[in-house]
Image (spheres, rainbow, N blue to C red):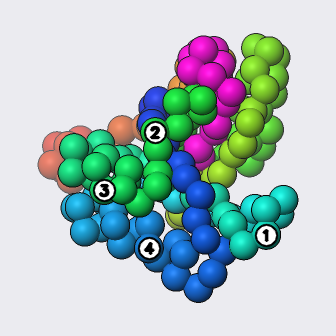
Amino acid sequence: MALKITKVDVWAGNLRDIPGGLAEKLEALSAAGSSLQFLIARRDDKQTGMGKVFVTPVTARQAKDAAGRAGLQHATNIGTLRVEGADERGLGAKMTRAMADAGVNVRGVSAAVIGRQFVAYFGFDSDADAAAAAAALKRISTARAKKRPAKKRTATRATRRRRAA
């Protein structure tokens, strides 16, 4: 199966490191009708009482307005790719090696496997780095598709009956 590689826009902002700090941000987006596909939130170890949140997508005008009011901004300094596909052993190593060989440094990554599928979000220092990483990942995707044997077609019940007759 080929990798599905998509450029995504990320919105980011500070949050208070208190109970409900993250809920405030998410409630603002929810009230505006936003449905998020991805979220990272973490404490800021360098600034006591503060944290960071990253979300995607924020596309509708109402959601963008709500995000702005909640203190989130479009993170124009981060190029981000969403990569999806069938999980296989060692794929993370292959993807990161391909990006490294293309001279691209990964700024951050979050990934999960659900069933037999994976989804990963790779952050880069620029959109140009994201584009170079996408090209490297597409080469892996093409190689994966070529290695997979074609599925054997099984005869239908009617075909088997005709053959037996």
143 up-or-down from 114: above or below? above
Which is more N-terminal, label 3 or label 1? 1
Q: Secondary structure at mark 4?
A: helix
Q: Position of residue 96 (x, y in %)?
A: 76, 32
The residue depicted at 81 percent of the width and 23 percent of the height is 100
Task: Point out residue 63 in the picture as x, y percentages from the top left corner.
Answer: 28, 52
Q: Residues within 10 Å of mark 3 (few under 14, many from 20)?
A: many
Q: Quadrant of residue 42?
A: bottom right
Name the N-terminal-most of marks 4 and 2.
Answer: 4
Span colored in magenta: 119-135
In the shown orientation, is residue 160 left or right of residue 24?
Answer: left
The residue where tag 1 is placed is: 48
Q: Residues within 10 Å of mark 4 (few under 14, many from 20)?
A: some
Please say whether residue 128 is one of the residues in the magenta stretch.
yes
Judging depth in this view, the residue of 82 and 152 nearest the camera is: 82
Distance from the alpha carbon under mark 2 to that under mark 1: 24 Å
Mark toward the start of the polypeptide (2 vs 1): 1
How many numbered markers are drawn? 4
**Residue holding disc 4:** 24
Q: Say whether marks 3 and 2 touch (CB < 8 Å).
A: no
